[in-house]
Amino acid sequence: MSAYIDTHRDQYGVEPICRTLGIAPSTYYAAKMRSPSARAIRAQALEPEITRVYQSNDCVYGRHKIWRQLNREGIPVGRDQVARLMRGLGIAGVVRGKVKRTTTSNPRAERAPDLVERRFAAERPNQLWVADFTYATTWAHTVYVAFVIDVFSRRIVGWRADTSMRTDLVLDALEMGIWARDEIARGLICHSDAGSQYVAIRYTERLGEIGAVPSIGSVGDSYDCEQNPGRRSVAA
């Protein structure tokens, strides 16, 4: 309240502001004469340190990282206190955007049957491939990465990165896999989810040209991570 009156007193005067706010002018003057509290003194000392850490890290650090950095520097402070002071300073860390949806199903498109039914196992190379793609957010833009995995070896046989989710992204990853495995026996099952990129005519036609059989699972269900923990450690 005192800060508000201080800001506008030259324009409106103390008494009119106090009358509008419903407080006695004596209350304002008494507050001005009181010595600052220990909390206020502590805040005055911490605010420049918080600003320094924030600016020295490209203005991206949030309360958690600033709190940890200050304590590493020997400046004891609580995380909630850092959050409160950051709000007062009008600064905030970079917040990640909404999760991007990479799989969009076309309910009217013809789709192959699910030949895998979540049984991700193979007895030989080039028996079952699994295709999928994900994304990573960078400073410049979002990058989408498509990949094809040979389930037998859990090796990435093809991949492609692009800034677009068009069919070319998954098709180029498939082409790399075909190039890497120049001897592909007919009957190879290439499994993916029901994303529009994988049910596109160009993609299914290319599978037919190499004698591969398409298999389509549900949306977002190309490869089950919980049943196949090795997916996270697949080597390129």
Image (spheres, rainbow, N blue to C red):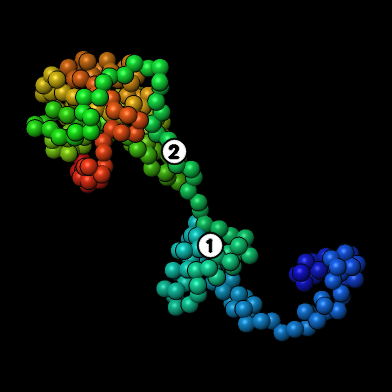
Q: Secondary structure at mark 1?
A: helix
Residue located 50% across and 63% down the image: 63
Within 10 Å of disc 2 (Cα), the crowding (few <14, some 14-19, many 20+) is few
Give the quarter of the image for residue 211: top left
Q: Which residue is mark 2?
A: 100
Q: Which residue is mark 1?
A: 55
Q: Is residue 194 visible?
A: yes
- Residue 226 appears left or right of 70: left
Give the quarter of the image for residue 41: bottom right
Residue located 18% across and 24% down the image: 189
Q: Position of residue 145 (x, y in %)?
A: 33, 36
Vertical placement of residue 233 versus 126, above or below:
below
Residue type of the residue flagged with mark 2: Lys
Numbered disc total: 2
Q: Position of residue 89 (x, y in %)?
A: 62, 64
Closer to the camera in the image, 138 or 188: 188
